[in-house]
Image (cartoon, rainbow, N blue to C red):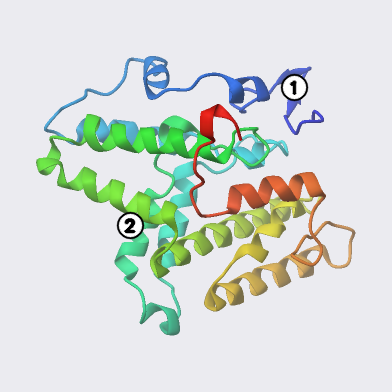
Amino acid sequence: MAANGETKINGEAAPGILTARSAEAPWSVESVLASIPGGAPEENSSSPVPFFHMLERLKTTKREGWRRFGIQHGESIADHMYRMSLITMFAPPSLASRIDIQRCTKMALIHDMAEALVGDITPVDGVAKHEKNRRESTTMDYFEKGLLGRVNGGMTGKDIKAIWQEYEDSETLESKFVHDVDKIELILQMVEYEKAEGCKLDLGEFSWVASRISLDEVKEWSRTILKEREDLWAGREHSTYSEESPPDPVALAQKKEYYDHRTPNPPLNGHD
């Protein structure tokens, strides 16, 4: 692994991993569409089928954080969102009585949809939060207007974009719950990969996200998962991070920017 966190194979960046160079390159929806094998889906169709084809990219695009640790055949973005959607259905009664579960399930299935074109940008990829949000917002606009603008009178596309924006704004109780579920799914996968590797792989770098869970009901799930992890390692040396025992300052700053749910304003005049 390179000093900047990029995975290297024979001195070259591993295929599909966002490198520092590619992170700095100009990005647009149009440039990504132009690179799709066989051409981009048809725009301005009254049928949702072109959008259905776009969703296939969520099935085949991997979650990049794991690939830095050599997990090349790990979960896809769709895998992640599917388990999240099921987890939302298990909100404890004390929480379920205060939220719209069906909306949470939809939100879990939509929240990373923009990654079909943007890809899975991680805290170490060198993409500023405002730029990540620009790419994702531009992509969601393309989905809403370019692919779904004439489907069902445009209402389905508007609904998808509105639910995505609600997640990004992270102001409603539903969005806060889904953000917490996002973190639960991450630490579940962390433990499962460690277990599959017989504890030869320490993914404790990801354990810090548990400290960012906000709802008490979800914190209980987190405590159960982290206890499972301690039992799995059974006293063997491994890394664990928390609010009281954070990662190094550089990694901590990256993670805090990434997991800050409020959408930042873009820099003025191109400067931070």
Q: Position of residue 127 (x, y in %)?
A: 60, 33
Task: Choose between 272 and 90: the one closer to the eye.
Answer: 272
Determine the CA span between mark 1 and mark 2. Answer: 38 Å
Quarter of the rendering containing residue 107 = bottom left
Is residue 178 found left or right of 18 in the rendered image? left
Placement of the C terminus among the 4 image quadrants: top right
What residue is drawn where x is 47% and y is 47%?
Answer: 79
Verify CB contact (< 8 Å) between mark 1 and mark 2.
no
**Residue 128 against residue 180 in the figure, above or below:** above
Quarter of the rendering containing residue 250 = top right
Amino acid carrying mark 1 in the image: Ile
> Which residue is identified by label 1?
9
> Which residue is identified by label 2?
106
Q: Which numbered tag is attached to residue 141?
A: none
Q: For the image shown, how many numbered marks are present on the structure? A: 2
Quarter of the rendering containing residue 53 = top left
Tag in front: 1 or 2? 2
What residue is drawn where x is 31% and y is 20%?
Answer: 40
Q: Position of residue 24 (x, y in %)?
A: 60, 22
**Residue 81 against residue 56 in the figure, above or below:** below
Visible residue check, residue 22? yes
Is disc 1 placed on a helix, strand or loop? strand
Placement of the N terminus among the 4 image quadrants: top right
Task: Choose between 52 and 18: the one closer to the eye.
Answer: 18
Is residue 21 found left or right of 237 in the rendered image? left
Task: Choose between 76 and 64: the one closer to the eye.
Answer: 64
What residue is drawn where x is 55% and y is 28%?
Answer: 270
Is disc 2 placed on a helix, strand or loop? helix
Q: Position of residue 111 (x, y in %)?
A: 41, 50
**Residue 177 against residue 15 in the figure, above or below:** below
Q: Earlier in the sequence, mark 1 or mark 2?
A: 1
Amino acid carrying mark 2 in the image: Lys
